[in-house]
Amino acid sequence: GKKEGKGSYKYAGGGEYIGMFFDDKRHGHGMYKYPDGDVYEGEFRFGRREGRGTYSYFKGEKYDGEWYADKMHGRGKYTYVTGKVFDGVWRDDRPHGQGKLIDGDRRFDMVYDNGVVTMQKPEGGTEKAKEEPLFSLGWWQNAFTCQPVTGCMDGRDTSNQAKS
């Protein structure tokens, strides 16, 4: 029979879901544990991450915010392994529009266009922030140039593409 109501299910690929089902799909509040150790906890709609939820990457990064059609979409906060936090608007898994980058006691007003930094300045200031690499969704970025590079500068793999 179809999965309905509260329950759990282990998938052939190694993933496991604990939460609400409707019409055989993940629907309502639940938690999905990915085979690689990543965990999503939050709202599902007809099998997809949709609504409010938190995705915790096993490498230590985390996104807490709104989801649509299985992607980070809407208002959300992304915490990087380095401790930096981007709090702002997301579209299709990328920062898009205004937000704040918090790095210890330093805060920057940011504007992104589809994942690319178009403006970065110290909070309340008008000068460009000093050129400092920022890692965002697989790209190193700063206030002056936005060029993709292969891998991370320190050699760690901190790729953070959301999985379906």
Image: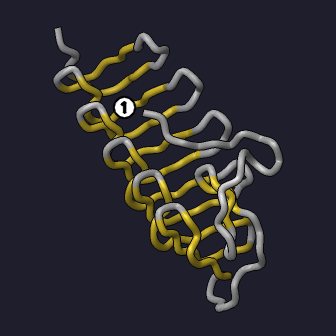
Quarter-of-image position of residue 131? bottom right
Instruction: Tell me where residue 18 appears, x and y as whole percent.
Output: 38, 23
Q: Which residue is labeled 1 in the image?
A: 30
Would you say 41 lies left or right of 136 here? left
Q: Is residue 153 above or below residue 25?
A: below
- Which residue: 64% across, 66% down? 146
Mark 1 burial class by Cα count in 10 Å: few <14, some 14-19, many 20+: many
Disc 1 residue type (three-letter) = Gly
> Viewer-proximal residue, 70 or 55?
70
Specify how the rendered protein is coloured. secondary structure
Would you say 78 lies left or right of 66 here? right
Would you say 53 lies left or right of 3 here? right
> Viewer-proximal residue, 101 or 161?
161
Location of the C terminus (image quadrant): top left
- Which residue: 43% across, 28% down? 32
> Viewer-proximal residue, 82 or 119?
119
Instruction: Find the residue positioned furthest to the right.
Output: 154
Instruction: Tell me where residue 70 appears, x and y as whole percent.
Output: 37, 41
- Which residue: 72% across, 74% down? 106
Q: Is residue 153 above or below residue 120?
A: above
Instruction: Tell me where residue 163 appears, x and y as whole percent.
Output: 48, 35
- Which residue: 62% across, 56% down? 136
Quarter-of-image position of residue 102? bottom right
Instruction: Find the residue positioned furthest to the top.
Output: 1
Instruction: Find the residue positioned furthest to the bottom.
Output: 126
Location of the N terminus (image quadrant): top left
Q: How many marks?
A: 1
Element type at marker 1?
Answer: strand
